[in-house]
Image (tube, helix red, strand yellow):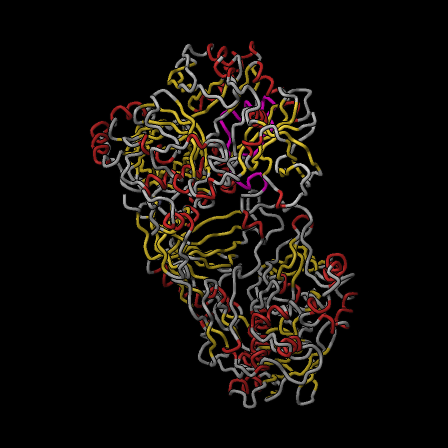
Amino acid sequence: MRLTCPHCGNRGIEEFAYGGDADRRRPDGEPFGQAWMDYVYLRRNPAGAHREWWYHASGCRAWLVVTRDTTTHVVASVQEVAR
Amino acid sequence: MDEPGIAIVTRDRFLASIEARRGQAGAVAATIAAAYGIDLPSAGRWAGGADIAFAWAGPGEWSAIADRPIARDLAGRLAGQAAVTDQSDGWHLTEVSGLRVRDTLAKMLPIDLDPAALPPGAVALTRAGHIDLRLRHLSAGVYELAVFRSLGADFAGWLEASAAEFR
Amino acid sequence: MTGRRLATGGTIDRARPIAFHFDGQAYRGFAGDTLASALLGAGVALVGRSFKYHRPRGILSAGPEEPNALVELRDGARREPNTRATTVELHDGLVATSQNRWPSLRHDVMAVNGLLSPIFTAGFYYKTFMWPAAFWEKVYEPLIRRAAGLGRAAAVADPDHYEKATAFCDVLVIGAGPAGLDAALVAARAGDRVILAEQDFVLGGRLLSERGRDPIAELGDLPNLRVMTRTTVTGVYDGGTYAAIERVADHLAIPGQHQPRQRLWRLVARRAVLAAGAIERPLAFGDNDRPGVMLAGAVRTYVNRFGVAPGSRAVVFANNDDGARTVADLHAAGIEVAALVDPRPVPSAATIAAAQAANARLAAGVSIQRARGRLGVRDVELSDGTTIACDLVAMSGGWNPTLHLTSHLGGKPRWDEKIASFVPGGLPPGMTVVGAAAGDFGSGYEIAPLWRVRGTRGKSFVDFQNDVTVDDVALAAREGFRAVEHLKRYTTLGMATDQGKTSNVTGLAIMAELTGRGIPATGTTTFRPPFTPAAIGAFAGHHRGRDFRPTRRTPMHGWAAEQGAVFVETGLWLRAQYFLRPGESDWLTATNREVRAVREAVGLCDVTTLGKIDIQGADAAEFLDRVYVNGWKTLPVGRCRYGLMLREDGFAFDDGTTARLGPEHFLMTTTTANAGTVWRHLEFCRKVLWPDLDVQMTSVTEQWAQVALAGPRAPDVLARLTDVSLPHMGLAETTIMDGIEARLFRLSFSGERAYEIAVPARHGEALVRRLMAEGDAFGITPYGLEAIGLLRLEKGHVVGSELNGQTTAGDLGLARMMSAKKDFIGRVMAGRPALVDPERPVLVGLKPREPGAILAGGAHLLPQGAVATAANDQGYVTSVGYSPQLGSWIALGLLARGRERLGETVRAYDPVRGRDTPVEVVSPVFYDPEGSRLHG
Ligand SMILES: [Zn+2]
């Protein structure tokens, strides 16, 4: 698989580290409950489009949001996490 | 004399990392331009010369590469604008060139080395096997490779093995 | 000696004879030969024995699809089994040996398997060797291994080296036959960067094999066209990535100096053109595996490309118009064609004309029932009852497009009735298929499908390499293994090293015929990488032996080696485990001496490998507050603090000291093992979770060499270098040794007065040498990881064995560190019921009741008198060591309600080592619990 980093260009997957579902949000300020359990443990596992974090570990060290089809590995978009 | 198949030279340079504070990238660029007469390079580029150069090192980050100690001077000028860290001892620097330099590097690096894709003036942050590596294309066919100091000996051995058939 | 070599023709260089050996016998071929063509040219028809039945086998094909002619190539350490003679480039000194025969190719004792064939039919493994289970390893498997098998791997390490490399292009053209050459030229002339990969050692593909075709159009000297011969594209991967094996030196007896034997290429291509041609199908008739029965296209290759007559009297058997072409080529080469056997009742005009021109009998509407002759074909019996003498049968059951690479990403081939073959279905993104690989066999190609000849005697082979016959397929059908995946596994059809290149489609079609379902309904064949077998060495490349993974060395590595250090890998780092003095031979003696030196005098240790992260920014303290359980805003500049990080799930993650260098400047240390993971975690925190914080981070692990100086005389040694004096947990930035920048920390994990001194890495070695010299008078002693482990164990400091991902701050006795005044990573989840359960095992010290008893990590903690069951398990031992100060083995462990049980005796139960040791539950701080030595 290859990802096109918005900073570094098209690179092999070995330069990146997977960061999981990019749509989960840390339930800041909430007490222990289902929201926390979901945030820490629950992952969607869609067959199809999936937004996920990738870290360009061996490159520019940006965290990226990648939209990937889990059934084909076709990457629809790669964007930097808003800073 | 004919150009050698491959030439490998170890370099000792003074390095510093620069990371702009939040929202201060523009100010950092202005300070560098005023102090050194160099425009901070954009993604994938480096700028400057043999005495002092700045290489892009990630969003909002640069490496300064100089022939003299540079970190203290930079830290002073960029106080409040950027975090500056001396890295002069953190990296093992190698300069490689020669007719077969790209054939050699193709055995180690997973990036497109064609001058159309990576011309002189380009920077690539990448890896050689499991060794993170920063490459600068200095001038046509002359590359500077930087790896962490602790991996220097190992990297040098692999580079030598990759170059051996072109010696 | 000319054997069956034709006087003229072909692309071989008759002026350059090449000497080689096969089964110990000397032969001669010519430059441009393959081993197969050279053997045929020398009149060698019998080249191997089959896998199961040990049937005599000859050369079937002229390409990588070869199922029969597998040989051991080279000898000694370079011996390579199962090499296809049809793809081996002949070179001077080539040595090849037939395989799977004993004692010799002509007399193979195991051929008796052929007589026992009823037990070797499909599913024989499952049926015959069912029970008793114990027999499998001891009796059945060795028996089968000896009786059925392939070549022998070399018994010693491969002396050659291999490489990996990467190349990029706009267009990758796979195959340099007519279609591939065209595609490469068009793309290159349009200015694209092109790689043309060809598995053969010359370009041309079928152009080389067909009469009247110019072998090669001039490619010219296009700088943007890179031609890679001897290079097989073996796999397609996501994102336009292709794997290819370049056989750099396989055509040499020994690779040139520094030359790799093979190179594994990763080719990254925007587009790919698959022009891999097609592979011919055998026909299934009785004893169709006799040496001398060959694929018709291969016969043409041997005649036209290699100038070899594979026989002197041929019968051509084809269900398509390739029969006519073969007859014509044989005739043109002066080889007698006895008959053209065409199962079609009304052969095409071209077929009739070819037979007439060659003066061959045309047997229309007829099939070969059986080939006869044991070590080589002698005659064939036809379905019309006639027998024709011949020593060569050229058969063609039609062609299969070489579409393997199109299905590597899941593309399903589609059945095309017109050519009676599968053609590429869904394609990998960016790939197009051209020429025969796309099913384009030219306008004149007509075929009447024939998969098996009925009513034959003898075995009709479908899969030659795995010895799967028509009867095996029929047996699978009868027994209900009708799905294509079941057929494959039950009969092993297509599961040999050739991946069924000549057999899959035929097997599938026979199953379709037997079940009456039609081919598309029966299934399709899919393929996985690699297209042809690949050497494991090529996948390792440079990274084997010592270079398996990179090694990190500290600037003091050379000094440590001089001091007798025995190194151990911790992550990628090499660290001194202990230092052997002259006369010492074991780790325990050395470690005890090192520990004693620290407790009684002063020790020196390289701690460079600890992760060091420089953290700056207006929000640096706030950031630390959020990632550590404890607070940082109150830490004064010039002071250090011990910090503990949790994971978001509430379990302990990493620990270390962090120093405040300035109001907005911190220096964090992490454990050596977690340095990379902590870095990535902090990057996630600052860039994803809290992008609004002003925080900058740089790793300075490599910039600073760091040395710990520990023991009662440590202050004396330090005083020789600097007059800076530090309070406990103090920090100073200063210069030492004539102006070398240095950071001094007063930190202790050993419970002794201790310092850490950091200097820029290039000065690391000078620093230790200076400290050793200055410390000599005080008995300074280098110590290693074993001593560190024991020193911290005596003080109850937790390390990786306790920070094992399953412990909480509370378990480790660090609950008090968790600030209630702020949020931090892991705070909420650390408070969930399961993690604050009072029954959780918590950190305790353990000491054997009997002096001298040895403890071991991993032992389970059981109550006295309890049965050793999981239900009675109350925890386990995490760290052990022999304390020279206490004269006893001591341990840390995790024990349920442990803090309430001090003084109680439990058992360290260690069934692995057969120990069951009563131990006393004690405080984890074994040594100097008051901390008097630290401040004294
Ligand atoms: Zn990047």
**Where residue B81 sits: x, y (%)?**
24, 30
Q: Compared with residue C680, is residue C935 higher up or lower down, i.e. above or below?
A: above
**Where residue C825 sits: x, y (%)?**
38, 39
Dividing the image into 4 quarters, which one contains the N terminus of chain C? bottom right
For the magenta stretch, what is the residue range? C545-570
Q: Nearer the viewer, residue C344 or C831?
A: C831
Q: Quadrant of residue C782?
A: top right
Residue C210 visible in the snapshot: yes
Q: Nearer the viewer, residue A76 or C818?
A: C818
Left or right: where C224 falls relative to C33: left
**Where residue C132 sits: x, y (%)?**
75, 62
Left or right: where C229 falls relative to A33: right
Q: Nearer the viewer, residue C837 or C453?
A: C837
Left or right: where C615 falls relative to C836: left
**Quadrant of ligand 1 in image:** top left
Residue at x 65%, y 62% (from the top left corner): C70
**Where residue A80 sits: x, y (%)?**
30, 47
- C555 part of magenta stretch: yes
Q: Nearer the viewer, residue C236 or A23?
A: A23
